[in-house]
Image: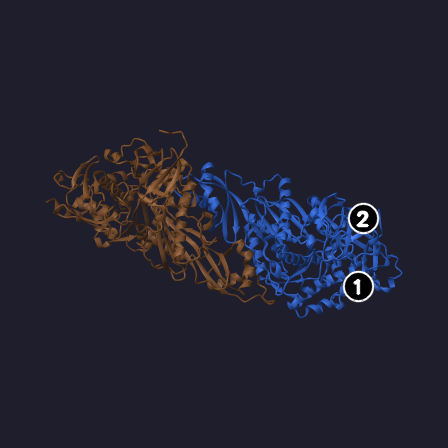
Chain colours: A brown, B blue
C-alpha cells in the first residue's frame, strides 16, 4: 500500500476508452465521474446498493473496503464496488453496459431517445392555441409631426392590435435598443412576447419579419431520464425529440438520496449544474440537428417532480425530505432562462409547471392535464409509476392525490436484473405451462435485463402459474422446477439462460419482495383515496397508467398482481410520458397553463405517511393480488384455473 | 507657440484651488471639467454664448481664438472664453463665482438647496395612501404535515391578507433565499413589495420586523438643477431634501445642446453617467445625513423633461430634437434601479413618471397632477417656465398642452447678469418715480445677478415706468436718465452700481429682447391653446405658474408684461417646483400614478413648430403687453397712468 503518497494514477475505462488521471487514494466512483462516466448508484456512494459494480484488470491496483454485496465468485473475477474502492495505481476498469451511462454517448442513446417518443404529438385538445411565447410581426406607421407617439407606446399599440395583452411590460435593455431597431426596420418589426401570469412581456424585438422562426423546448425532468421536445410554436408540431440520462444519477438513484447527498456535501450547486448541463445538452443537440439558432428558442418549459424542479432552479430542497415535507415554491414564476443557466435566447423565459406538494410534482399536474382528468364528468384514476407511485383520483368537480414512496422497483431499480426501458430490456414475458419462458426485448436485441413492463409480466406470470404464492414466496410445489435454484442471495428463478456470452437473467426472491412492496404501496394509496372519497371500483370510468414501462405494457397484468383496482381492462389506458405531453400542451396554450394552475391549486393532497390507515392498507396489499380477494374478482377467476 | 509638443501643463483654478494636469493644447473648458469645475456653457463649447468667461494670470499661458464676445477692457484684464482657449503652459485661472458650479461644493450648495425647498410637503390630496413600494410585516404559521403549503405560496397568502395584490411576482433570487429566510425568522418576515403596473413584485424579504424602516427618494431631473427629497413612506413625511446642479451643464445649458453634443461626441454614456452620478450623490448625502442605509431605500421616482429621462436611462434621445420629434418611450416601465446605475437597495425599483411628448415631459404631468388641474370642474391654466415654457390648459374633461421653445431667459440664461435663484440673486425689484432702483436679494446677500422673479420685475418696471416702449426698446425720453448708458453691446440700464467691490448689474437691450421673446413664446402658446379650445380669459378659473423663479414672485408682473392672460391677480398662483411635488404624490399613492398615466395618455399635444398660427401669435406677443391691448385691459390702465 502506498497510501499517503500523492502519486497520479491513470484510470482507463472500458469499453468507452475514456481515461482520467487521479491522485492515489481517489475513490473509483469519483474517478469515473471525472472521466465522464456515469455509474448507477442508488445509495449515493454509501456502499449498500451494489449498483456500481465494475471489473478491474488487476486486483493490486485498488484498495477495497469489505462488502457483503459481492459473491466470492465476483471477488475472484476482480469485480468490485466503485464507491468502496480507492485507486492505488494505474488501472483499467471495465464497466458492465447495464451499469454505465456514458456521458459521450448519451445524446445518441437510442434507449433514452426511444423513451422520449412514448409521448407523441398530444394535441392541445380543448385548449385554445395561444403559446406562452410567440412572435408577432407588426407593421407600424412611422411617426410624423401629427403622430408623435413614442416608439415604446407605438409598439404596444401595434401588439395590442394583434393579441389580447392588457398588461404589458418591457425589459430595460429592449427599451434601450428599440428606437434603433424600429428605425432600421422602417417600423416593421418582429416582437417576441412571453406570458408571465397576466402580464405580457416583450422579450425581444427584431427588425423585419422573423415570425416564422419561433421555437421552444419542453422538458420532462425525470429523476432518471431527462427528455426534451423541440416544438415549432408557429404550427404546434414537435420538430424533434431527444433524451439523456439525468447525470445526477451517481449521487443516488432517487431524489431523496440526492437531497441527502447534496446536503451532506454542500453540493446543491453541483446538483443544479448537472441537471442544467443535461438540459443544455439536449437543447443544443436539438437545435443543431434542426439547424436552429439558440437565439430562435425563446422559451423552455419544464415539468418534473418537485425535487427535480428545485434542483434545476437551486431552490432549497432540503425540507422536501423532512417533516413537514414542504416545497420552497409550488408555483414557480417564469424566470429568464439565463438566470438558471439555461442557454437559449438570452432573454428567453423558463417556465416550470406548478406542483401540488413536496411529493406530488408538476409531472403529475401535467398528467392530469394531459389525460383531461380535471374535465371528466365521471371519476377517473391517474397512476404514475416511477421512483414513487403517484395517484390522482377525481373528476371535474374534485381531485385528490397521494404519493406512495414504495420505491422504484418497476423502474428496474432494486431488482437484480432490472433496467430501464432500453435496448435489450425484456418488455414482454410469459411463462408457458411447461415452465419455459417466452419473452420479447426492446429492439429485439439480446436480453440484457428486464424493464418495467417485463417485471409486471414476470410477477403476474409467476403468480398466475402458481410459481409464487399469494405472499410472493416461491412455492414448495415448484422446488422441482429446473428454473428454480438456490444462490447466495436465496431462491431465484431463471428467466433467461446465458445466451451468446450474455449473462443469465433471473428474478430473485428479494426482487419479488421489492416488486410486491412497490405495487402494494401504489394500491394502498389508491385505496386510501377511494375510501376517503367513497369511490367504488365500479364508479371508475377510466384508469390512466403513466410511466416509463416499455411500449407494450399489458395493463391487464397490473390488475392481476393487484396494483390497480379490478376494472374491465378496456377501462385501463397506458398513456406513457404524460409529463412531457403536459408540458407541451401548456407551452402551446395559455389556457392550458391556467388549467394546470387550477389543478395544482385545487388538488387535495393526502399525506400517506401521517395517514392512520395507510400502513394497514399497505400490509393488506402485500398479498397477490390482496388479502381481500373479493376486491379482485377477475383475478380470483384466473388464479383458480391454475390452482386446480 | 509650442503647439505639437505634448508637454504637460498644470492648470490651477481659483478660488477653489482645484488643480489638474493636461497636455499642451487642451481646451481650457475641458481642463476645468477634468479638475471637477463645472463652468456654465449654454452653447456647449461652440463659443457664442460667452458664459464661460474666466480670468487667467498670464496672457502668455493660453492661445485664444478671436471672439466678438469680449470687450477690449476684458481682453486687457486677461478675461477669456474657456471654450475658445487652449492651454500652452502652467496657468492659474480665476473663475467668477456666478459662472462656476464647483463639484465639491455642490452638495452643500445653499442656493440649490434653497430651490429644493420651494416644494414643501404636498399632501396626497384626494389620493389614497398606497405607496408604490411598501414594507409589510407578515406573521405566518409554520408549515405542518396538515398544512404543507410551499413557502412561496404561504408568503403570497400572507401578503394578500394585508394588501390588495391579485397579480404578484417574485424575482428568482428572492425565491432562492426564501426558505432560509422564513425558517430563520420563524415565519415572521418583512416583505418589501413594489407596484409594477398591475403587478405587485416581492422586491425583498427579511426575517423579523423591519417595516418601520421604509424610505424612497423623489427626484426632479431638472436641466439645470437636480432636486431630491427623501421620503419616509411609513408616514409620508419628507425627511430631508437636497439639490445639486446638473453636471451635464458644461455640455450645454439646454437639453437640445446636450443631445447635439452627445450625438457629435458619442457621449450618451457620459451623459447618463453624469446625471446618474448626480442622483447617486444626492441619495448618499440624504441617506448619510438621516443615518439610513442605502439598502433601506427601496425606490427612486423621477420626474423631469423627456430628454433628461432619456439621458438618465440612456434611451436614445436623438429624435427629440429632429422632426418628427418623438421620444423612445413616454411610459417608461419601472426597472430595477441598479440597471440604470442608481445605488439604492440592489433590488429596489426606479420609477419614471410618464410624459406626453418629446417637449412635454413628466415634470409637466407632475404639475397637472399636483395642481389637480385634471380634476377641476372649471378650465384652468398651468404654465411652467424653465428652459422651455410648457403650457397646459384644461379641466377634468379635457387637457391640451404645448411647449414654447422660446429659450431660458427667465432662468437667467441669455441675460447678461441673469442667474439662477440663488444667494445674492435679485429676486424683487422696483423702479421708483425718480428712476432709482430698489431691490431685494435672496439671503439678503450682496447682489450678484438677477434671477427669474427679478427679471420679471425688471421688465415690468421698465415698461410701467416708460423706460422701455411697447416694443421693448429703451425710450428716447429716457436718454437723459442717468442709469442709461451706451456700452459695446448697445444701450444698457444700470440696476445696481458697483458696490463693495461687486460689479455693477445692468440690463441690456439684448437682455430685454430675450426676455420679451421668451414671454412672447409662452403667451403665444397659451393663446393657441385658448383659441383652439375656445377658452376666453374670463373662463379661466385659475392660473398655476410653476418654475424656479424665486420665492417672492410678484405674479401680477407676469400679466403686466403680457406673459399670462389678463385675469384678476387672485386667480394666479405661484406653485414652485411641481415636478418634485408630483413625484412625491405618485410615490405615496398608486392612485396618483394611475392618474398621472391617465393624464399623460389623454393630454392632447399641440406641436407649435408646425402650427400655422404660432408664428403670427408669437409676433403679436412680442409687444408689451401685446399688439392687441384689448387683451390686457388691466395693463392698459396702469400704463396709461405712467404715459400721461
* Residue A316 placement (x, y as % from top left): 42, 41
- Judged left or right of residue B145, residue B557 is right
Disc 2/disc 1 C-alpha distance (Å): 41 Å
Q: Residue at x 25, y 38 (%)?
A: A616
Q: Tell me if I can see residue A330 in this picture.
A: no
Q: Is residue A208 left or right of residue B57?
A: left
Question: Dividing the picture into quarters, in which one does residue B50 lie?
Answer: bottom right
Query: Residue A259: image x %, image y %?
Result: 38, 39
- Mark yes or no: residue A296 visible: yes
| Front residue of B7 and B108 | B7
Q: Which residue is mark 1?
A: B472
- Considering only vertical position in the picture, is A644 above or below A90? below
Of circles 2 and 1, the one toward us is 2
Which of the 4 image quadrants contains residue B373? bottom right
Q: Secondary structure at mark 1?
A: loop
Residue that protrudes farthest toward the right in the picture: B480
Q: Which residue is mark 2?
A: B58
Residue B196: mark: none
Q: Nearer the viewer, residue B50 or A110?
A: A110
Q: B644 or B584: which is nearer to us?
A: B584
* Element class at badge 2: loop
Q: Residue at x 74, y 66 (%)?
A: B621
Find residue B262 and report its horizontal and vertical position in percent: 64, 56
Please say if A435 is above or below B489.
above
Residue A340 lies, in percent from the top left, at: 45, 47
* Quadrant showing the C terminus of chain B: bottom right
With respect to residue B216, does B597 lie above or below? below
Q: Earlier in the sequence, mark 2 or mark 1?
A: 2
Amino acid at each position: 500500500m502506498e497510501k499517503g503518497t500523492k502519486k497520479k494514477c491513470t484510470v482507463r475505462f472500458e469499453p468507452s476508452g475514456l481515461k482520467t488521471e487521479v491522485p492515489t487514494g481517489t475513490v473509483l466512483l469519483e474517478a469515473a465521474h471525472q472521466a465522464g462516466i456515469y455509474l448507477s448508484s442508488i445509495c449515493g456512494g454509501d456502499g449498500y446498493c451494489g449498483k456500481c459494480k465494475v471489473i478491474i484488470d488487476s486486483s493490486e491496483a485498488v484498495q477495497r473496503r469489505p462488502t457483503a454485496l459481492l459473491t466470492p465468485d465476483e471477488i475472484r473475477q476482480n469485480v468490485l464496488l466503485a464507491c468502496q474502492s480507492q485507486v492505488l495505481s494505474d488501472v483499467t476498469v471495465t464497466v458492465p453496459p447495464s451499469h454505465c451511462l456514458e456521458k459521450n454517448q448519451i445524446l445518441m442513446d437510442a434507449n433514452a431517445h426511444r423513451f422520449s417518443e412514448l409521448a407523441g404529438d398530444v394535441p392541445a385538445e380543448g385548449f385554445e392555441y395561444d403559446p406562452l411565447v410567440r412572435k408577432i410581426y407588426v407593421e407600424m406607421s412611422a411617426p410624423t409631426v401629427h403622430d408623435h407617439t413614442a416608439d415604446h407606446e407605438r409598439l404596444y399599440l401595434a401588439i395590442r392590435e394583434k393579441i389580447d395583452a392588457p398588461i404589458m411590460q418591457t425589459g430595460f435593455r429592449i427599451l434601450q435598443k428599440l428606437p434603433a431597431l424600429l428605425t432600421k426596420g422602417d417600423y416593421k418589426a418582429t416582437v417576441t412576447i412571453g406570458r408571465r401570469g397576466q402580464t405580457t412581456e416583450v422579450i425581444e424585438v427584431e427588425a423585419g419579419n422573423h415570425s416564422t422562426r419561433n421555437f421552444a423546448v419542453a422538458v420532462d425532468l425525470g429523476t432518471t431520464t431527462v427528455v426534451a421536445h423541440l416544438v415549432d410554436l408557429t404550427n404546434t408540431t414537435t420538430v424533434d425529440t431527444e433524451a439523456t440520462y439525468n447525470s445526477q444519477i451517481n449521487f443516488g438513484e432517487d431524489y431523496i438520496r440526492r437531497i441527502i447527498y447534496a446536503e451532506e456535501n454542500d453540493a446543491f450547486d453541483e446538483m443544479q449544474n448537472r441537471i442544467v448541463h443535461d438540459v443544455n445538452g439536449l437543447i443544443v443537440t436539438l437545435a443543431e440537428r434542426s439547424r436552429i439558432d439558440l437565439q430562435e428558442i425563446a422559451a423552455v418549459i419544464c415539468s418534473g417532480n418537485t425535487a427535480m424542479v428545485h434542483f434545476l432552479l437551486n431552490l432549497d430542497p432540503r425540507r422536501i425530505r423532512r417533516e413537514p415535507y414542504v416545497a420552497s415554491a409550488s408555483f414557480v414564476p417564469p424566470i429568464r432562462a439565463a438566470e438558471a443557466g439555461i442557454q437559449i435566447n438570452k432573454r428567453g423565459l423558463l417556465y416550470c409547471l406548478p406542483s401540488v406538494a413536496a411529493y406530488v410534482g408538476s409531472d403529475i399536474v401535467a398528467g392530469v392535464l394531459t389525460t383531461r382528468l380535471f374535465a371528466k364528468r365521471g371519476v377517473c384514476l391517474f397512476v404514475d409509476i416511477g421512483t414513487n407511485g403517484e395517484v390522482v383520483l377525481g373528476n371535474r368537480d374534485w381531485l385528490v392525490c397521494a404519493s406512495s414512496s414504495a420505491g422504484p422497483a418497476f423502474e428496474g431499480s432494486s431488482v437484480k436484473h432490472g433496467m430501464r426501458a432500453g435496448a435489450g430490456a425484456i418488455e414482454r414475458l410469459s411463462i408457458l405451462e411447461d415452465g419455459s419462458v417466452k419473452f420479447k426485448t426492446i429492439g429485439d436485441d439480446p436480453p440484457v435485463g428486464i424493464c418495467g413492463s417485463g417485471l409486471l409480466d414476470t410477477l403476474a406470470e409467476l403468480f398466475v402459474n402458481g410459481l409464487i404464492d399469494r405472499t410472493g414466496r416461491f412455492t414448495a410445489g415448484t422446488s422441482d422446477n429446473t428454473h428454480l435454484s438456490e444462490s447466495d442471495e436465496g431462491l431465484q428463478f431463471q428467466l433467461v439462460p446465458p445466451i451468446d456470452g450474455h449473462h443469465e437473467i433471473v428474478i430473485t426472491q428479494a426482487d419479488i419482495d421489492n416488486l410486491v412492496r412497490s405495487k402494494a404501496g401504489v394500491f394502498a394509496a389508491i385505496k386510501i383515496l377511494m375510501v376517503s372519497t367513497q369511490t367504488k371500483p365500479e364508479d371508475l370510468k377510466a384508469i390512466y397508467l403513466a410511466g416509463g414501462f416499455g411500449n407494450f405494457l399489458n395493463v391487464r397484468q397490473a390488475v392481476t398482481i393487484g396494483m390497480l383496482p379490478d376494472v374491465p381492462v378496456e377501462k385501463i389506458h397506458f398513456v406513457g410520458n404524460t409529463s412531457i405531453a403536459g408540458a407541451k400542451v401548456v407551452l402551446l396554450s395559455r389556457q392550458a397553463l391556467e388549467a394546470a394552475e387550477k389543478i395544482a391549486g385545487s388538488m387535495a393532497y393526502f399525506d400517506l405517511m401521517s395517514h392512520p390507515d395507510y400502513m394497514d392498507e399497505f400490509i393488506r396489499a402485500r398479498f397477490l393480488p390482496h388479502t381481500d380477494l373479493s376486491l379482485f374478482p377477475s383475478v380470483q377467476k384466473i388464479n383458480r384455473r391454475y390452482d386446480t
